Amino acid sequence: MSQFWLYFQLGLEHVLDWNAYDHILFLIVLVASFSFLTWKKVFWLVTIFTVGHMLSLFLAVYKIVLVNTTWVEFLIPVTILATAIFNMINAKKKENKNNVGLLYFSTAFFGIIHGLGFSSYFKMIASGTDSVFLPLLEFALGIEAAQIIVVLGVLLLSFLFQNVLQITRRDWILVVSAIVIGIILPILKENYLAL
């Protein structure tokens, strides 16, 4: 297997690993209130998130930014909880009436936090590598491919539940956000106690 595919696959598997599902949970709540009809907003949200976490991933790997991993591990579930609560508060609003500016800003900030979380994993797998730039780029591309898979999966489920099973948009958002909150609260408590 070439080096490109090795690091690309590591990035892909790191996001899609069911034992490290926090990134998947964030992506689920990030796009739960959108549909294929608002693909442009989804595209910009995911792009902003990607830029945020790629920037912090590069800065952390090159030791320009150093952050305590305990804080990062605590803040990741906080970002998921905050996004789920935002969804629940805005569930009644129409898709195009959400406060998108606030959502874009918070998504960029949350992307930075998630990128810092990826950096500790990447440092571990790339230790001993002469040059980290190309492996880091390949790893980041794998992460982005995994994000596209998750986002398309959520949008497809949203379409099926809302258009085939006739679940209202509001109910879809509330149920998805509540499930994610139920999953993330124990993780948040565990990481809070570790501080």
Image (cartoon, grey):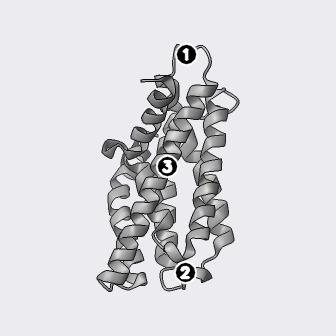
Residue 178 vs residue 13, the one in the foreground: 13
Instruction: Kindly give the residue lying farthest to the front in the view shown.
Output: 1
- Locate residue 184, reporting x and y percent: 37, 56
Residue at the spot 61% in from the left edge and 27% down from the top edge: 134
Circle 3 is placed at which residue position? 76
Residue at the spot 50% in from the left edge and 73% down from the top edge: 36
Label 2 to label 3: alpha-carbon separation: 26 Å
Q: Is residue 115 left or right of residue 195?
A: right
Among numbered discs 2 and 3, the one appearing first in the sequence:
3
Circle 1 is placed at which residue position? 129
Residue 123 vertical position relative to residue 152 in the rendered view, above or below = above
Q: In this orientation, does residue 68 appear?
A: no
- Locate residue 157, reporting x and y percent: 36, 69
Label 1 to label 2: alpha-carbon separation: 46 Å
Q: Which quadrant holds the N terminus? A: top left
- Locate residue 88, reporting x and y percent: 46, 75
Circle 2 is placed at which residue position? 95
Among numbered discs 1 and 2, the one appearing first in the sequence:
2
Instruction: Kindly give the residue lying farthest to the left in the view shown.
Output: 165
Mark 2, other Cα within 10 Å: few <14 / some 14–19 / many ≥20: some
**Disc 3 residue type (three-letter):** Ile
**Disc 1 residue type (three-letter):** Thr
Q: Secondary structure at mark 1?
A: loop
